[in-house]
Amino acid sequence: MAVQDEPRFRELAAAFVEECRRRGVRLDQAAAEGVLTSQLSLYSSRAHVSEVEVLARYFDDGWPRRFAALFVRCDGGSGRRTVEPDRAFGLDNACSLLTALALAVELAVASGGHADRDECDLAIASAAVCVAEFGVAVRSRCSPDVVLPGAAVRFAREVLDVAAERAAAGTWQRCWCSEPLHEHDDLRAVVEQLQVDLLLLH
């Protein structure tokens, strides 16, 4: 049975439609099912298990809320997404993106206790998928360039965009404590580096 035939799949897609509606984005059931299918396919390919198993093990009742927080942030309110083509990067730029994703994870992990926990958790999970995809692309390359899957490029852009914006606003920080900012917590250089790395993805 295809994963789209699972009652759980339709329930999560319907809940995702509602979460997007609450955030001001109109999305129909078919579009929501397309988004969920792409997510399941990506995780399935990395975990080497079926999409049905991914749905059962990793997509809980909180997925619609968590993913809507990032989807609406990056969707522009249209309710539509274009297919991202695969992209070729030089090895140095691919490694820069890996470093930037690691920095985004560091910020999200340190900020989970005082910022939007759902957004932090989703950024961590999405960045982890990106890092895995990027690592496979680096190891398996047959030319000087690294060809990155379009879906991973899109996820990386979204994660780094959110990380740069939240760090610039002071919502995400590198320090775990709640004390006033220490000297090492000046995020201006971090934000500037994330913004530079984001240019590679546009």
Image (spheres, rainbow, N blue to C red):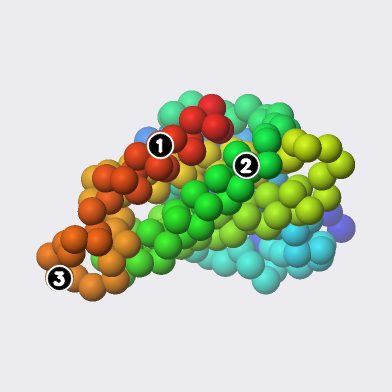
x, y percentage for residue 19?
Answer: 44, 48
x, y percentage for residue 146?
Answer: 74, 40
Classify 10 Å Cα crowding around label 3: few (below 14), some (14-19), many (20 and above): few
Classify 10 Å Cα crowding around label 2: few (below 14), some (14-19), many (20 and above): few
Does the rendering let one see residue 26?
Answer: no
x, y percentage for residue 100?
Answer: 49, 49
Return the residue at label 1: 195
Indicate which disc, 1 or 2, sits on the residue closer to the N terminus.
2
- Label 3 vs label 1: CA separation? 27 Å
Disc on res. 141: none
Indicate which disc, 3 or 2, sits on the residue closer to the N terminus.
2
SS type, badge 1: helix
Looking at the rendering, which quadrant does residue 142 occupy?
A: top right
Label pair 3/2, CB-CB below 8 angstroms: no
Label pair 1/2, CB-CB below 8 angstroms: no
| Rendered residue at 71%/32% (across/down) | 88
The three-letter code of the residue at mark 2 reads Asp
Q: Which of the two marks, 1 or 2, is nearer to us in this view? A: 2
SS type, badge 3: loop
The three-letter code of the residue at mark 3 reads Glu
Of residues 16 and 161, the one nearer the viewer is 161
Return the residue at label 2: 92
Return the residue at label 3: 179
Q: Is residue 113 above or below residue 83?
A: below
Using residue 82 as the reference point, say whether residue 185 is left or right of it. Answer: left
| Rendered residue at 87%/58% (across/down) | 1
x, y percentage for residue 39?
Answer: 66, 50
